[in-house]
Image (cartoon, rainbow, N blue to C red):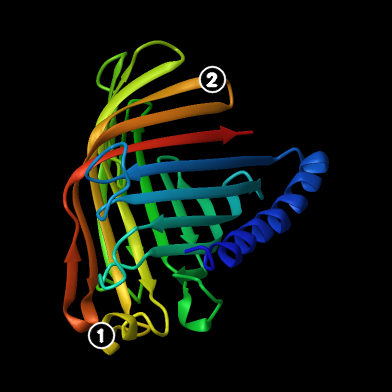
Amino acid sequence: MKSGFPPAFFLAALLIALLAMPAWSSAIELKTISQELDVGLGYAGKEATQIDSSGELNTSLKYVASLKVSRDLLLRLGAEWQLYSFPKPRDSVVPPSLQQANAIIGVDYQLAEQWLMRAELQPGMYGDLKRLDGRYFDAPLLMGFVYLIDADLQWFFGLRADLKSHYPVVPAVGVRWKFDDLWTLNLMLPNPRLEYDVNSKLQAYFGAAILGGTYVVGDHFGDDRGLPQLNNATLDFTEVRLGPGLSWKARPNLNVDIEAGYVVHRSWDFFDENINSTGNPGPYLQLGLRARF
């Protein structure tokens, strides 16, 4: 994992710097730039305070700058870095780490008075990233449509397309319904949940989270495990979480999130080779910071 960290981290940092500088300079003149920064850190495993053979550490960093091009069109540019670390024995088919370092290129467009659209391409490197190689390149596409019935009720329709995945196209339908002054049913993937506004600064919720992606392992990953067919193999990593959380508005533009619960499903699927490994269910703890400015 140590040798894989620097190239991924510095690629993400470089993308963020390159994209942020023109956004900040343009904002001075246009005053139509909004920015998002999300940072996450979490642990999941058998024991909440001990890293063992089924544990997982995850770290994420995401930056997006949005430029208002016209009354109906918003351009989104950014970068993202994410790391999953699994301290497994060397002979396990579970990779010691999975990383992604990608750009974010997207648009928000108002199709009609009640219809909004978002399209987002995420080209980048997806794998163990011990070295940068074209085989790690992927470009998942996210598309979503929102139908605004009123301020309290919205329907969502979308899909995720990734030609490298076992499931190249995954559709989704969701709804956000504020059915009470304090309660909101927010059934939008990948984080559907029921929300309760404790006060103007604190929100409690209970819900689920779906994590993962499609990655390519290294040149000798299979050789090291006596399974040469897994060299440069593609896998789908999937994790499903369930539990409560709190979101605290520390400042008008800064939220601090904490949630804890249970990982009910975790799998590493080398679908081309019909090799699938699943992890034991266990607790998780996740911390996050969300800044909007």
SS for callout 1: loop
Residue at the image point whose x is 40% and y is 64% from the top = 98
Up-down relation of residue 14 to residue 243 (above or below): below
Task: Tell me: residue 236, above or below residue 245.
Answer: below
- x, y percent for residue 50: 31, 42
The extreme bottom residue here reads 228
The C terminus: image quadrant: top right
Image vertical order of residue 199 relative to residue 121, above or below:
above
Residue in the image at 29% along x and 89% along y: 228
- The residue type indicated by label 1 comes to Gly
Who is closer to the viewer here, 106 or 18? 18
Q: What label does residue 249 carry, if any? A: none
- Residue 185, quarter of picture: top left
Residue 177 drawn at (x, y percent)? 27, 29
Looking at the image, can residue 110 be seen? no
| Left or right of residue 64: residue 211 | left
Query: Mark 2: which secondary structure?
Result: strand
Drawn side of residue 103 relative to residue 286, left or right: right
Pick the residue in front: 224 or 267. Answer: 224
Labels 1 and 2: the sequence-earlier one = 1
The residue indicated by pointer 1 is 226
On residue 250, the disc is 2
Asked if residue 27 can be seen in this view, the reply is: yes
Left or right of 179 on screen, residue 288: right
Q: Residue at x 32, y 21 (%)?
A: 204
For the point 52% across and 42% down, the residue is: 39
Quarter of the image holding residue 274? bottom left
